[in-house]
Amino acid sequence: MSVVLVINSGSSSFKYQLLDMESERVLASGLVERIGEAMGRARHTVFFSDAGPAVTEATYERELPIPDHTTGFRAMLDAFADDGPSLEGHPPVAVGHRVVHGGARFFEPTLITPLVEINIDELSVLAPLHNPGALQGIRAAKTAFAEIPHVAVFDTAFHQTLAPAAYTYAIDAALAEQHRIRRYGFHGTSHKFVSEAAARFVGRPLGDLRQIVFHLGNGASVAAIEGGRSVDTSMGLTPLEGLVMGTRSGDVDPAVLFHLSRRAGMSTDDLDTLLNKRSGLRGLAGVSDMRDIEKGVDEGDAAATLAFEVYIHRLRGYAGNYLAQLGGVDVISFTAGVGENSASVRAAALETLGFAGIRIDPVRNDARERGIRVISTDDSSAIVLVVPTNEELEIARQTLVAATS
């Protein structure tokens, strides 16, 4: 049995999954949160599978002081020991770590060495909300699992295939090089997983396909993928650029910031908070969840309706952009929380692409089914899919390859 432990660590919490890579089945998952607060919480779920398709689960919760990530990992190990599955019976062969920003230095899953840790730390300037927490998780995990390989899987790595024309900002070139300012792109593990799953589903070689993947969650991005390689993506230097998101603005005229600084007296930190936490759907309608927005639209709420229309306008703009960049499209996929569950978002996003022969079947689109499914009409020029993403499984796959090669 090849078992991989996947860690997704932030500054005050971390999520984990233990996966049997022979069956690609999740054995257990959990969340350790409120690290550094007076009282922390650890949730651990064990999945049981019999000989048939049925899977049952049991969840256990504990509250205890968790002053740091190392203590959090001890709580996770205690959960495995007390509630199962036993790590002695299911020993991990490697630990995979999600790291948001790899800059231009990392373009594949990478065995974590002291030098790699230094690089992740140095790249924190590009992802101050993400990389420091990932590094804390890495160091705590290496203490808990000192004898097995640890692998970093970077959100930005999949987009390292972007051409200079796609990743270069039109600012002073010397300044940009000095401060590593360029477009990096994010959600790479999801875009990779979904584009490969879509190719298998439609039964065509990945290398033959032009694909557009919409990863629509609280954070949202879209990628143009040709032959399995990312050629364009909506996020940039940071995850702020691009689509309208739950609390992030996405694309905005940079001069807005100058104006607010001069006229509203807003500091750099004020502007950062505005665009990352007080914008997007929340900024427009006061709520960040698309389900609340759709409820407001149904009830005739003007702010919710405008927020939905702005969200869709941005999606259509990128769909048309990438249709042109790719010279046509064979497969369009929707994934993540909004993409997998909102029929109205999917329908509205592609509604204006009839000129290109892309058509959504309303019955298929509205069906509440699980798994990969087709939502386009039989005569649509492109196959439109809903593809549930599984970033943890993708991280585990890449970790296993890197740890055993």
Image (cartoon, rainbow, N blue to C red):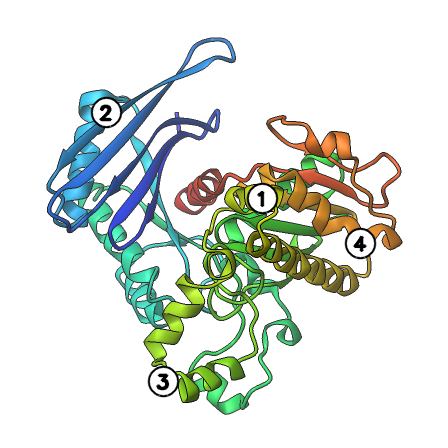
Nearer mark to the viewer, of 1 and 2: 1
Q: CA distance from mark 3 to mark 1?
A: 35 Å
Q: Amino acid at mark 4?
A: Thr
Image location (x, y in percent) of residue 264 = 40, 83
Nearer mark to the viewer, of 1 and 4: 1
- Above or below residue 22? Residue 71 is below
* Quadrant assignment, res 113: bottom left
Q: Are marks 2 and 3 in contact (CB under 8 Å)?
A: no
- Give the tally of numbered discs: 4
Q: Amino acid at mark 3?
A: Gly
Residue hosting label 4 = 352
Image location (x, y in percent) of residue 169 = 58, 80
Kindly give the residue lying farthest to the top in the view shown. 51
Element class at badge 1: helix
Q: Nearer the viewer, residue 153 or 339?
A: 339
Residue hosting label 1 = 294
In the rendered structure, find residue 88 and report the number of the disc placed on it: 2
Near mark 3 (Cα within 10 A), the count class, few <14, some 14-19 or many ≥20, is few
Element class at badge 4: helix
Q: Amino acid at mark 2?
A: Glu
